[in-house]
Amino acid sequence: QVQLVESGGGLVQPGGSLRLSCAASGSIFSINRMGWYRQPPGKERELVATVTSSGSATYADSVKDRFTISRHNANNAKNTVFLQMNSLKPEDTAVYYCNAYLLATTGWRIADYWGQGTQVTVSS
């Protein structure tokens, strides 16, 4: 089994910062890409940022220059992804989901896996 465990959400004032973390564990052979998506209230889930195993990052236009995604090399596994969020705005309020596109040893198939989500609320 594969697990993605997120942490770091919470309530912050506009202009503030938060750092989200997500650790992948379990029956993982390799991770191609990790990233963050979010679902604002009453809206569909949307891409925030992704980073590949080689370190190539992409961002939604709405978060460019404010958010930074990175991956941590833990025992050469690169199984943790971070999202540093600065200059937060009320419109960043959403449930943030960690995503990993990986090859699991259970079944030996490449698929998307998701965390349970963490709430980020930007409000004064």
Image (cartoon, helix red, strand yellow):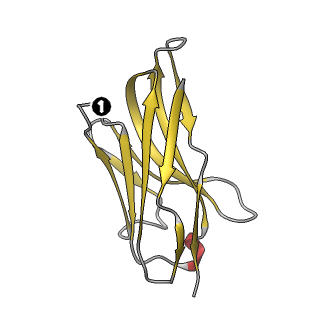
Which residue is the extreme one toward the right? Answer: 42
Q: Is residue 92 above or below residue 96?
A: below
Q: Is residue 18 above or below residue 50?
A: below
Q: Residue at x 55, y 34 (%)?
A: 113
Q: Position of residue 80 (x, y in %)?
A: 36, 43
Which residue is the extreme one toward the bottom? Answer: 124
Residue type for callout 1: Ala
Q: Residue at x 36, y 36 (%)?
A: 79
Report which quarter residue 32 is drawn in: top left
Looking at the rendered structure, the secondary structure element under dot 1 is loop
Q: Position of residue 11 (x, y in %)?
A: 55, 74
Quadrant including the C terminus: bottom right
**Is 58 in front, or is 30?**
30
Quadrant including the N terminus: top right
Q: Is residue 69 above or below residue 124?
A: above
Q: Position of residue 44 (x, y in %)?
A: 70, 55
Q: Position of residue 45 (x, y in %)?
A: 64, 53
Horizontal side of residue 122 vs 85, given as left or right = right
- Mark 1 closeness class: few <14, some 14–19, many ≥20 residues within 10 Å: some
How many numbered markers are drawn?
A: 1
Q: Residue at x 60, y 70 (%)?
A: 93
Which residue is the extreme one toward the top? Answer: 107
Q: Which residue is mark 1?
A: 77
